[in-house]
């Protein structure tokens, strides 16, 4: 059983494209085609508008919270080709940095795991992915992967800062050798995996092919150090795939079709424990999926837009529809 516990009237004047809770679940950031980013205090079921951030000159597609160890920081990206990093100082939200290094709409922003420092990946319709790294004293270093996806990049998602298998194999007291990785999805129907080389340059490590239309979102699952790495992807083709990799080298990824929907699927999002996947699509529904004991993905709920509680429906037999 899944039920809607709270609705927030954002007073946005146009379509809302993203809504993200902060680390503690006490604040909600939203962004819209009305060019604004809003932050609400949603503690105890309330909704108090804390900030109405204006700085973008086009629809704002996505927002992302940085880890609170760096303070209260929010990134936003827009059709206006800009990425803005907002910071709260003494209770007031202000623009801290603006990145205008893309030639087209910036569609996705994602902060790296906090272990790596403040690093933001940004995917753009110009086909490039830029990586902004905070170097201190208000300065940001920019690295750019040109032609990451032909026609454009729609989504970026970082791998967790956990070495696969480390829960079982890691000798105690030894610092793990973290390799920075992230996934991206694009208009070339591909998911690509990127890895930082020892010289600090980014290199394409893998191409994952299964979708027959634009990849709209990718989400690398959180990990506690089990041997398997998992990525979810969704596409204009209506399909959601779960990609898994069991070998330590990270070379062999196999896709499993979670479900074929009748409409575009816009977003996929993992629960913190990575055992439930939320899927939202063009049918205005959010569905929650869980892997059953026999390895099949089953729908444990679906919540219609604007509806209250919905009883859980298990749709076994739908996994193999193409």
Image (cartoon, helix red, strand yellow):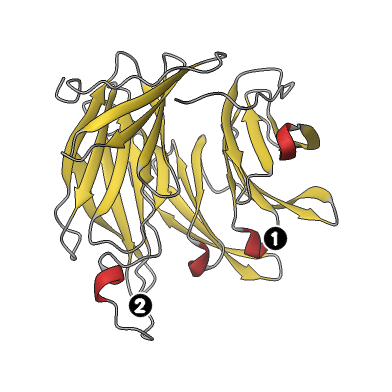
Res 17 seen here: yes
- The residue beneath circle 2 is 176
- The reply to whether residue 41 is visible in this rendering is no
Residue at 38% from the left image edge and 43% from the top image edge: 219
Residue 200 lies left or right of residue 55; in this view the side is left
In screen coordinates, is 98 left or right of 305? Answer: right
Q: Which mark is residue 225?
A: none
Q: Nearer the viewer, residue 147 or 257?
A: 257
> How far, Cα to Cα, is label 2 from label 1?
26 Å
Task: Answer above or below: position of 228 versus 56.
Answer: below
Vertical placement of 81 versus 8: above or below?
below
SS at badge 1: loop
Q: Residue furthest bottom?
A: 173
Query: Where, by quadrant of the figure, is residue 49 drawn?
Result: top right
Cβ atoms under marks 2 and 1 closer than 8 Å:
no
Compared with 69, 321 (above or below) is above
Q: Which residue is mark 1?
A: 71
Residue 61, image x, y percentages = 55, 32
- Left or right relative to 308: residue 292: left
Instruction: Please state the horizontal and vertical placement of residue 120, each as a whole percent of the image.
Output: 52, 55
Q: Secondary structure at mark 2?
A: loop
User: Residue visible at 36% across and 72% down?
Assistant: 178
In the rendered view of the protein, which quadrant contains the N terminus?
top left
Q: Is residue 247 left or right of residue 151?
A: left
Q: Nearer the viewer, residue 198 or 92?
A: 92
**Label 1 packing within 10 angstroms: few (<14), some (14-19), many (20+):** few
Q: Residue 141: give x, y in percent of width and height.
A: 56, 64
Quarter occupied by the C terminus: top left
Tell me residue 250's x, y (percent): 20, 60
């Amino acid at each position: 059983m899944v039920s809607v516990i709270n609705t927030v009237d954002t007073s946005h004047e146009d379509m809302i494209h993203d809504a993200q809770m902060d680390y503690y679940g006490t604040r909600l950031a939203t962004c819209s085609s009305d060019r604004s980013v809003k932050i609400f205090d949603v503690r105890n079921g309330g909704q108090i508008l804390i900030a109405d951030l204006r700085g973008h000159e086009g629809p704002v597609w996505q927002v992302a919270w940085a880890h609170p160890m760096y303070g209260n920081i929010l990134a936003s990206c827009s059709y206006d080709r800009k990425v803005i990093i907002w910071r709260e100082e003494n209770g007031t939200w202000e623009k801290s940095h603006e990145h205008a290094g893309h030639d087209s709409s910036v569609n996705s922003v994602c902060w790296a795991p906090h272990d790596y420092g403040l690093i933001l990946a940004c995917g753009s319709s110009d086909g490039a992915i830029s990586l902004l790294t905070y170097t201190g004293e208000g300065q940001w270093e920019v690295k750019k992967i040109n032609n990451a996806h032909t026609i454009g990049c729609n989504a970026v998602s970082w791998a967790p800062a956990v070495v696969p298998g480390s829960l079982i194999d890691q000798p105690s007291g030894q610092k793990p050798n973290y390799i920075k990785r992230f996934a991206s999805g694009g208009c070339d129907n591909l998911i690509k995996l990127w890895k930082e080389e020892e010289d600090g340059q980014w290199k394409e490590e893998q191409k994952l092919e299964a979708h027959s239309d634009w990849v709209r979102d990718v989400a690398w699952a959180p990990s506690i150090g089990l041997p398997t790495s998992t990525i979810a992807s969704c596409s204009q083709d209506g399909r959601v795939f779960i990609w898994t990799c069991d070998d330590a080298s990270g070379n062999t990824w196999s896709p499993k079709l979670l479900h074929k929907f009748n409409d575009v699927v816009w977003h996929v999002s993992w629960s913190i424990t990575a055992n439930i996947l939320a899927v939202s699509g063009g049918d205005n529904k959010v569905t929650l999926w869980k892997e059953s004991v026999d390895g099949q993905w089953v729908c444990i709920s679906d919540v219609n837009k604007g509806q209250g509680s919905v009883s859980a429906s298990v749709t076994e037999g739908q996994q193999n529809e193409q």
